[in-house]
Image (cartoon, rainbow, N blue to C red):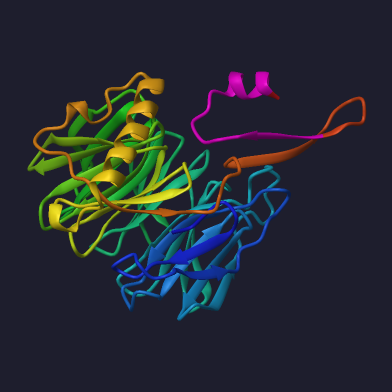
Amino acid sequence: TGAMDNTIHLYEPDYKAVPQLLRGHQSRSGVSGVRALACSGKGPDHIASSGCDGRVLIWSSGVVQDTLTGHGEGVQDTNRSVISCLSWGADGAVISGGWDKSARVWKDGKQVAILQKHTVQVNSVVALPDSRIATGSGDMTIGIWQGSNLVRNLTTGSPVRALCSCTGSVLAAALNGGIVQLWDVATGAKLAERRVGNDHLMSTAYRRETCELAVGSSTGTLTVLRVDGTTLQVAETLQTCGGVYGLAFLETGDLAAACEDDSCVVWTKSLSRAESQEFRTDFAVRAAALAAANGSSGGGQSVGTAAPPIAAASGSFSSPDFSFPVEVADGRKLTISWRRGEDPDAVALNF
């Protein structure tokens, strides 16, 4: 897990041992945070991380092996150095995307390609099975790239927050406004679209063995859908205690959700592996309170029995997602802060 205090925690599969703490990312212009993590497949501790400091770090056995820089160089935007997403290619290449509107490909510690066509920030990158790359952006498009060439541009109709590769040439997209789409990247055809709520969808993950697609919203709702050909069917809806900004299906089939309440919650379908009844009751009360505050029904929309959490690992970021120094006309030096998904007018009014 990665947190807004620039730290990374590595947990053992049983979640019982004290996690290994990795420190490497730094604050930049008053902004902190690990924004993305990606596992290479070469081992549980061989990972890439990216942050608000404009760096991609390659880790092995808890030690930084390489540092990749280039995002934001020559760009004047305030947020130019934020690297928001990562993916590993089958050939060992690292793909990164950032708020400088570009995606970049790195091989053996060197930048080998820059993907530049998006007009606003890149929120998601995915290495596709056919060696191409998909990029999702706030400009309401998905780019399909061969090398540094844009070979297909898919118009989504809403800002793209997260992408994940499904079976074959099928790509899933999680959008603002609670929209989930399936695309065939080989033909450019939209296969399916389903609205699972009204909130921004911030994360997504797919499990090939069961054809399950999970999407997490900015208000803490976690929806699991079954992908059946060209249809999306809601299997169950779970409620967490904070916006879901990261999702991953584990080898066990459990589903891990990184939430803005400083926790990572792991859900299981196995009651024998679930947390104690006391823990689950307390969790359900807190999740229901959040759902009520957001005006959503939380887990009440689920089909079948909602999977119970087996662990809630506390994170250590209690700060807002973004904080920027501001000097006002009378000379005061203040800070404007907000969380992802907050209404801009409300942020301005609070400031």
Q: Residue at x 64, y 44 (%)?
A: 79
Q: Residue at x 29, y 68 (%)?
A: 13
State how many labels appear. 0
Task: Tell whether 16 sits left or right of 328.
Answer: left
Within the magenta stretch, is there residue 345? yes
The answer to which image quadrant residue 26 occupies is bottom right
Residue projecting furthest to the front: 278
The answer to which image quadrant residue 61 occupies is bottom left
Give the position of the N terminus as an image quadrant.
Answer: bottom left
Residue 224 position in % (x across, y down): 20, 40
* In-front residue for pair 24/184: 24
In the rendered view, tell whether residue 270 sits above or below residue 196.
below
Within the magenta stretch, is there residue 77? no
Task: Tell whether 186 sits left or right of 339.
Answer: left
Residue 164 position in % (x across, y down): 29, 50
Residue 127 position in % (x across, y down): 32, 60
In the rendered view, tell whether residue 273 sits above or below residue 172.
below
Task: Tell whether 324 sits left or right of 300.
Answer: right
Whether residue 270 appears in this view of the structure is no
Q: Residue at x 71, y 25 (%)?
A: 351
User: Residues in magenta?
Assistant: 334-350
Task: Tell whether 200 sits left or right of 167.
Answer: right
Whether residue 68 appears in this view of the structure is yes
Residue 54 position in % (x across, y down): 61, 58
